[in-house]
Every structure is written in C-alpha cells, then in structure tokens.
Image (tube, grey):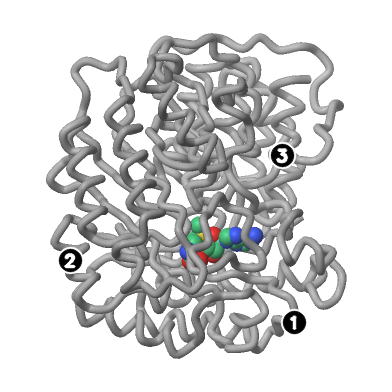
C-alpha cells in the first residue's frame, strides 16, 4: 500500500525510456519520488479490447520549458539513498571550492548542455530550473553561475523563472546562500528528513539537529521567500511521538512547501542490507499509513494544501518544476543519471561518472539524438497520464483524456471506479470541480454520453485514495491495456 506509493520516478515510467549502449536504462531521479509500478494489473477490469485514439496536439510534443540539473556531490552517502551521487568524503564545504572532481564534472555538464540540440524553433525560454542531487549546495556558487549562464545562452531563462536548489544543513552559510540568490536561485529545498538526533545518525546523515536549526535560521535571515522542507516518514525506530514532533517543528519553521516521503528500502543501500520492509525496526504498513494520515492532517490544519501525494504547499507555493512532471509536460535533464522527457520519450543518462563522460563525448560527436520525433505508444502514454495525474489533488482531466485517448477507454475507466467512488477512495468532479454524488453517478453510468459530458475530473481522495493509489492505478492499467 503506502510503501509502494513512493519510489524513484522514472523506474515506473515504463518502456519509453530509451535503452541502448549509450543510454543504459536505470534512471535518474530528479529527487522527486513517484509510485512504483503497480503490482499485478487486474485483468478483469474490462473484457473487450479498447481502442485508444491518437491525440492531435499532445502536450508532450511541446518544446520543454523546464530543466533538471543533477549535481551529484555529497559529503557521504545516506543509508537509504540509491541516487547517482559522488561521495566527496571529508571535504568541507570550504575546501570543496577547488575540488577537481567538482570542477571536472561542471565542465562536462556544461559541454552536455551546449551539445544538446533542441529540434524546436523557436525555443521558449526556460520557466523552471531545478538543481537536484546529490547536494547541489556543495557546489561553489561561481560554478553554479557557469551552469546558469550556459542554460541562458543555450535556451534562455525567463526573468521570473522558478530556480530551485536542493540544499543540505551544514553545507551553506549566509554568504553562500546570498551569492546563490544573487545568481537567481529563488527556491530552496532543504533536506531535513527528521528532527531527532538518533534518527539522523541512523540514516547516516552528515549533519545533526543543530545544523538543521542553523540552516532554517540562515534561510530566514537571507530572506528566501520560497522554500521547502523534505521529511522522511517510516524510518527505522521512528515512533509516533517523533513523527509528531518532526511535523510540529516543520510547521513552526514555516516553510512554504513540505515534501513528505515514505521511506523506500532500496536494494544495494545500507538500509537494504539491514532491514526488510514491514519488519521491526521498520514500522508496519498500518503504522506507515498512520504516519501518512498524521502528516496530511497536521499539515492540512496548518494551511498546507496537499496538492500531490508527497507534496504540501501554502497557497500558490506549489513547486512549478515538479508540477511539469505530474502534468506530463516535457523537460530537459542534464547530468549524471538524469532523465529527460522530450517528444514523448524518456532518455536516461548513465549513472557512472566514466560512462556519463563518454555519453557527453558521444553527444558532441553527434552519436546521440535526443529530440527526434519518436513513435509514441498511446497506451503507455495513457497509463503515464493516469498514473501521474492521480498523484495530484487536481486529478485526471477527464475531457482532455477523452480527447486524447477516446471516449470508450475513458468511460470504461469511470465504470471500473464505481465501487471505489462508493467507498470514498475515488472522487468524480464536474467541470466546476463540484463533487458528483453517488446517486448522480449511478444515473450517469447508465448513459455513456451523459457520463462523458458530466465528468470533469477524476481524483483520488486524501488521504484514503492516495494511500490506495497503487491498487487504483492498477485498475486503470487493466482498462487501458486489458
Ligand atoms: C535527492 S534527495 C535530496 C538530497 C539532499 N542531499 C538531501 O539529502 O537532502 C531528495 C529527497 O529524497 C528523499 N529520499 C531520498 N531517498 C529516499 C528513500 N530511499 N526513501 C524515501 N525518501 C528518500 C529525501 O527526503 C531527500 O531529501
């Protein structure tokens, strides 16, 4: 259940990921976590094959206006982390300034951006840039400036673009943050994870609670107007009281945005070798679900809007960059292990530095073409759209789904969710986002045309529907690809 609602993104976004020797599969992460592939697809959802119609102007064919930049350096690897990172060891943020590993990487990254052909003319300037990691705040601002300059000259960056950076407590001071803000970084995503010394230690974090409070202080004193905090629930030995305390201190710190991730035990991590999901000292599924509900309630009461499965924000502080993922819009990605989404195709970059460097060389030599039109499998596209939009409180835009994939599959989707509407897990809304009642729905399902006209959105309820998202998404897959 909840365990499987959060996992590294592109592992789930199946077969469109290009896999060849230059671009080996096993995808990056933009530090945005998505649900794992659902378990077994329920094949009994529909008995006859459905026709999927081809959209005329799908949004994935638009030129990307977002760029993810992977800056992989960390002081050390956290015990839960399987992201593509480079552990610098005992390097302090000050000595990192001249670390040749960082200098070389930034040079390669810049070459990658410069060598990327766009296939779009004219090209819109970027509206969002997201520096994820790793720990981007370990990279000296003068090198961040070089990356931004390259993006600016290659694609342009809107004057009011959202430019986010993931930062770790203990890796920045007032001066560094002010320098970054001077470069245009206007959104900070602070990786806190927990407010208890023992939990931070058990996670192998390179900082303690003191540094967390200092980081919050620095963000406040520098006047960052838009910042987010990351927390992890279901950590080993995490008690309900600890989770309550973390949520309380988060609310007190007043970030504009909070991301709450349920711990994923990844294989080939220290946690993977130590723990089995569901077994002590990890919480049971029931306890994890309790943590999830508690986050939803506490943050809701503090006026955070639960706009996506793992994301909460104060009004109008949703992360614009991450939202491009949820609404299936295209985006560039640059750097080790990152994945882009252009013209309906996801491209993964290698996760090992040496392979990534070779990849960039191949790109420069014209051996990789990232933006060419590709055959897009409409069924897979429909599944991606359902899976991504069900993560959001907005939900699936029913009319555009009908337009893109045909009324037959869309109507069938409504019918398959009827029992879940009655159980309160799935909500049907009209075009004005008024909830359609059970009685109204019962009469609509008798007439396909009425159903098609009346439904505006389908969304999962919060928190019960979100907690059941895997099962519910599996049902949709059974309809789309019976
Ligand atoms: C790329 S990581 C951020 C890295 C950054 N250096 C930090 O540690 O805060 C983005 C977020 O993903 C979450 N995360 C990473 N691995 C996870 C896992 N295995 N389970 C749950 N959340 C995870 C953490 O909350 C982390 O802040």
In the image, residue 88 sits, relative to residue 440, either above or below, namely below
In the image, residue 91 sits, relative to residue 416, either above or below, namely below
Q: Nearer the viewer, residue 216 or 49?
A: 216
**How dense is the environment of label 2, judged by Cα within 10 Å: few (below 14), some, or many (20 and up)?**
some
Q: Which of 101 and 426 is in front in this view?
A: 101
Foreground tag (1 vs 3):
1
Foreground tag (2 vs 3):
2
**How dense is the environment of label 3, judged by Cα within 10 Å: few (below 14), some, or many (20 and up)?**
many
Residue 276: where, in percent of width, then height? Answer: 84, 64
Q: For the point 27% across and 78% down, which residue is it?
A: 173
Mark 2 vs 1: CB contact within 8 A: no
What whole-number distance in Å separates the C-alpha atoms at marks 1 and 3? 27 Å
- Callout 3 secondary element: loop
Q: Ligand 1 near label 3 (Cβ, under 8 Å)?
A: no
Which residue was labeled with disc 2? 179
Residue 132: where, in percent of width, then height? Answer: 42, 53
**How dense is the environment of label 1, judged by Cα within 10 Å: few (below 14), some, or many (20 and up)?**
some
Foreground tag (2 vs 1):
2
What whole-number distance in Å separates the C-alpha atoms at marks 2 and 1? 39 Å
Q: Quadrant of the N terminus?
A: bottom right
- Callout 1 secondary element: loop
Residue 96: where, in percent of width, then height? Answer: 35, 66
Q: In which quarter of the image is the C terminus?
A: top right
Mark 1 vs 3: CB contact within 8 A: no
Q: Residue 37 carries which label?
A: 3
Where's ligand 1: which quadrant? bottom right
Q: For the point 71% across and 39% down, which residue is it?
A: 37
Q: For the point 48% across and 64% down, which residue is it?
A: 88
* Image position of 28 (left or right of 228): right
Q: Which mark is residue 237?
A: 1
């Amino acid at each position: 259940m909840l365990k499987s609602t959060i996992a590294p993104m592109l592992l789930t976004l199946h077969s469109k990921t290009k896999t060849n020797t230059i671009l080996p599969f096993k995808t990056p992460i933009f530090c945005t976590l998505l649900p794992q592939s659902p378990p077994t697809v329920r094949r009994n959802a529909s008995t006859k094959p459905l026709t999927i119609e081809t959209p005329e102007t799908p949004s994935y064919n638009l030129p990307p206006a977002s760029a993810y930049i992977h800056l992989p350096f960390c002081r050390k690897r956290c015990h839960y982390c399987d992201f593509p990172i480079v552990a610098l060891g005992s390097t302090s943020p000050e000595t990192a300034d001249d670390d040749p590993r960082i200098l070389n990487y930034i040079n390669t990254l810049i070459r990658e951006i410069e060598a990327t052909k766009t296939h779009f003319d004219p090209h819109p300037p970027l509206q969002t840039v997201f520096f994820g990691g790793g720990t981007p705040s370990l990279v000296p601002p003068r090198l961040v400036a070089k990356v931004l300059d390259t993006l600016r000259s290659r694609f342009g960056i809107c004057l009011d673009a959202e430019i986010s950076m993931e930062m770790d407590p203990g890796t920045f001071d007032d001066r560094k943050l002010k320098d970054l803000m001077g470069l245009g970084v206007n959104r900070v995503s602070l990786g806190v994870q927990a407010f208890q010394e023992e939990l931070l230690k058990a996670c192998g974090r390179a900082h303690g609670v003191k540094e967390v409070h200092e980081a919050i202080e620095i963000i406040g004193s520098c006047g960052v107007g838009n910042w987010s905090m990351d927390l992890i629930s279901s950590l080993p030995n995490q008690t309900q009281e600890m989770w309550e305390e973390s949520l309380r201190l988060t609310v007190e710190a007043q970030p504009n945005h909070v991301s709450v991730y349920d711990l994923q035990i990844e294989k080939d991590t220290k946690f993977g070798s130590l723990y089995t999901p569901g077994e002590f000292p990890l919480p049971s599924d029931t306890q994890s679900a309790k943590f999830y509900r508690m986050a939803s309630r506490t943050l809701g009461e503090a006026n955070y809007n639960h706009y996506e499965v793992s994301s909460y924000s104060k009004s109008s502080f949703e992360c614009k960059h991450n939202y491009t993922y949820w609404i299936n819009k295209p985006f560039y990605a640059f750097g080790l292990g990152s994945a882009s989404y252009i013209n309906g195709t996801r491209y993964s970059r290698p996760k090992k530095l040496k392979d990534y460097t070779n990849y960039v060389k191949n790109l420069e030599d014209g051996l990789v073409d990232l933006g060419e039109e590709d055959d897009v499998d409409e069924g897979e596209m429909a599944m991606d759209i359902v899976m991504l939009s069900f993560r959001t409180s907005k939900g699936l835009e029913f009319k555009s789904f009908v337009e893109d994939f045909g009324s037959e599959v869309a109507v069938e989707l409504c019918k398959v969710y009827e029992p879940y509407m009655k159980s309160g897990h799935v909500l049907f809304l009209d075009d004005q986002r008024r909830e359609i009642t059970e009685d109204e729905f019962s009469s609509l399902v008798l007439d396909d045309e009425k159903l098609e006209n009346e439904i505006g959105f389908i969304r999962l309820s919060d928190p019960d529907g979100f907690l059941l998202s895997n099962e519910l998404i599996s049902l949709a897959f059974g309809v789309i690809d019976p």
